[in-house]
Image (cartoon, rainbow, N blue to C red):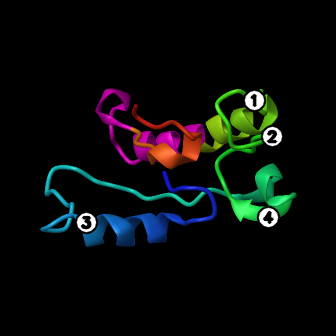
Amino acid sequence: FQCAGDTGRGLRAWVRDVTEPDLSFNHIRIIYPTAPARPYTPMRGALSTVWFDRHKISRDCHEDRESIDDMCNSLGLIIQGEVNAGIPKHRIVIGLQVMQTGWTRE
């Protein structure tokens, strides 16, 4: 999933820029969904395409569980759409761009 403020289309363009050849496979379907626009607290409540809100960009802040529940519901709909298209649940993998969660490797 894309970083805050980006789109699925933007993430796909970035993936194309950093992979050669294009990250595509005959036996794997890759989708790049865009998060819904929602007020984003670190941007003083401005609308941004983010999967969930947070109180600040820091490891030591409380999670906004309501927006995380919203994200889970959105992901559930995406997964259900894939299942309805004939993809077994055990064949679905969800990726997340690391910056979305503020996590970094040390």
* Image position, residue 9 (x, y; %): 46, 70
Q: Amino acid at mark 2?
A: His
Instruction: Kindly identify the residue that appears in the image at 67 percent across and 37 percent down.
Output: 58
Instruction: Say which quarter of the image contains residue 68.
Output: top right
* Image position, residue 2 (x, y; %): 51, 56
Which is closer to the viewer, label 4 or label 1?
A: 1
| Residue pointed to by mark 3 | 18
Q: Amino acid at mark 3?
A: Val
What distance separates the C-alpha of mark 3 from that of mark 1? 32 Å
In front here: 23 or 31? 23
Query: Judging from the image, what secondary structure is the residue with disc 2 in?
Result: loop
Q: Earlier in the sequence, mark 2 or mark 3?
A: 3
Q: What crowding class fits label 3: few (fewer than 14 Cα within 10 Å), some (14-19), or many (20 or more)?
A: few
Q: Earlier in the sequence, mark 4 or mark 3?
A: 3
Query: Judging from the image, what secondary structure is the residue with disc 1 in?
Result: loop
| Residue pointed to by mark 4 | 47
What distance separates the C-alpha of mark 4 from that of mark 3? 28 Å
What distance separates the C-alpha of mark 2 from that of mark 3? 31 Å
| Residue pointed to by mark 1 | 61
Which quadrant: the C terminus?
A: top left
Instruction: Kindly identify the residue that appears in the image at 77 percent across and 29 percent down.
Output: 65
In front here: 27 or 56? 56
Give the numbered dot on residue 55: 2
Instruction: Say which quarter of the image contains residue 25.
Output: bottom left
Name the magenta segment's main secondary structure: helix
**Residue 76 sits inside the magenta stretch:** yes
Q: Earlier in the sequence, mark 4 or mark 1?
A: 4
Q: Are marks 2 and 3 in contact (CB under 8 Å)?
A: no
Instruction: Kindly identify the residue that appears in the image at 45 percent across and 43 percent down.
Output: 96
